[in-house]
Image (tube, helix red, strand yellow):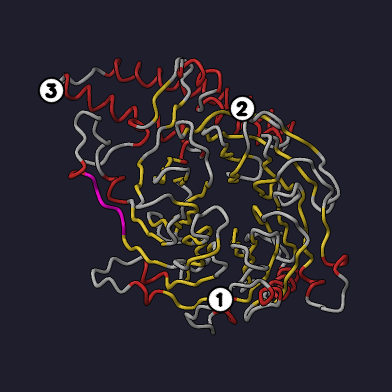
Amino acid sequence: MKFSPFKIFFGLTPNNNAVAMALCVIKCSDQPLDISFHPSNPHIVAAGLVDGTVEVHDFEEILEETPPPTTEDYDEDDEIDTIVSSTPVHTRLILSKSSESGMRNAVCRALQFSSDGTVLYTGGSDGDLVGLDASRICTFDTSNHKNNAIKWRCSNATYGSSGLQVIHEFRQKEEESDPSVKLIEEQLQNHFRTLIATGDESGGVRLWDTRLLSQQNDRRSDKSNGSHSMKRPPGCIHSWKVHEDYISGFANSSDGCTLVASSADCSISAYDLRMARHHNHPIDKVVRRSDDQEDELLSIQLMKHGRKVVCGSGEGILSIFSWGTWGDVSDRFPGHPASVDALLPVDEDTLLTGSSDGLIRVVQIHPNKLLGIMGEHEGFPIEKLKFNANRNFVGSSTHDQNIRIWDARILQDNYDHAIDHEMSTEEEQQEQQQQPTPQLKPTNGQLNNSDNEWEDMDHEDSEDGDSDGSDEDSDGANTASRSKNDKRKNRLKTEQEKFFEDL
């Protein structure tokens, strides 16, 4: 029997606010450091693990099952196995100052599905950039020949001997425009559609042409000194080193011509890729760097149709930059009690934030407002937040072995209609069970009275709708956005409610 996520996994507070619980929990064989959802299959998620392997899970079956049993009834034999494949990718021993032996195993720190779903890019602390055949690893195979899934490997893809930290694929937003302008934009974007960007632990940023990378094979370099990595490896078309600490995230403009990177050295940098095509331009014509913000910038996203760049910081402040003004922030949004390690845009005005206090918050940008809490990780810091292919689910990872799947339909505009439909259906079923005997046919007068009652309710609803519409007409698009987020706020649990619930 299929469950209804609206009825089972969203309780109601006294203020009728929804309390989100994870729809399901995917257990990995080790701690996941990064996750990526398949771009077309909404139930496939890949995880890069701390032991250097890449696991792929299919969680469709556990979503279709009834809710998980209580602790008393729990039996590990009844647990559904979601794993589709497990591929050792980053297994090399690397130098370590903290280890007694001076060596430690590499970890898989970053991964990203390509937009067409054919390749899964992975990066590890061994400095390797690897491309996996997604069709192989996303298909269950009992032959245990998943090593053949590695299509190519670029060893020592970072500066020096540092590890690879972030992988970003350039993706343009589909927007309507004039056909002649759109043709020119497509000609400009053709150069960027095959690019991926990587950031490493030492602050290096590199740009790669995936067509050149696909010509590489699965070869591994055993060099351990860092001098060879200062040169661009095969497939790397641009390389910059302007930061002193690791790169924490990337964002690109809608036309793909500008790349913005955030770093733990308390600054961001913007790269003009059109200028970078001309190698004779000095670096100050290609790269712009912000002032020291005196706080680590741990995550980054574009908002407000590309006009604002939002960064999560170590002190829990959202630092907001205006596009093109890279020197200093234009606004700061405090309120998180701990660092903001993950950001995920819901729309152009709303963000999900993952904080090290273990809470997933829903935040509105300009006007800045905390709408509520979507879920919690029981005190574990939230490292990653990702949407699945149809944006109905959000995946999150933390410092345990689990990937939690959250129902994102609570953030959609039609959520109220969906939950009302679920509740009305349940009430009808209960009435049918309580009154199994056939009812007498009502008289004409009763029918007319019933119709009049519904007409009165419709009339009241129409009056409410007219008043709302007049407000939207007067205030414009900003009022419509605020009204949409006000509805979201009513569905979510506030921090005060969460505090007293914990007590």
N-terminal of the two: label 3 or label 2?
3
Please tell me the numbered disc located at residue 339: none
Residue 174 in the image: state x and y as whole percent: 62, 61
Say which residue label 2 marks. Answer: 466
At mark 3, the secondary structure is loop
Question: Given this view, does label 1 or label 3 mark the residue nearer the observer?
Answer: 1
Measure the C-alpha gap from mark 3 to mark 2.
Answer: 41 Å
Q: Classify the position of the N terminus by image quarter.
A: top left
- The answer to whether 293 is drawn above or below residue 177 in the figure is above
Left or right of 467? Residue 295 is right
Q: Amino acid at mark 1?
A: Cys
Residue nearest the observer in this picture, 28 or 445: 28
Residue 62: x and y in percent read 29, 46
Residue at (51%, 34%) from the top-left corner? 358
- Mark 2 and mark 1: span between their CA atoms? 61 Å
Q: In the picture shown, does residue 443 fall above or below 67?
A: above
Tell me where residue 384 appears, x and y as whole percent.
53, 47
Magenta span: chief secondary structure: loop
Q: Which residue is mark 1?
A: 154
- Residue displayed at 52% across by 38% down: 381
Closer to the chain start, of discs 2 and 1, is 1
- The residue range painted magenta reads 79-83
Q: Residue 219: x percent and y percent? A: 49, 81
Circle 1 SS class: strand
In the image, what residue type sits under mark 2?
Answer: Asp
Instruction: Give the alpha-carbon distance from disc 1 to disc 3, as whole Å.
Output: 69 Å
Query: In the image, what residue occupies the spot 78% across and 76% down?
Result: 277
On screen, residue 477 versus residue 124, left or right, reads right
Residue at x 41% of width, y 46% of height: 403
Q: Is residue 68 left or right of residue 272?
A: left
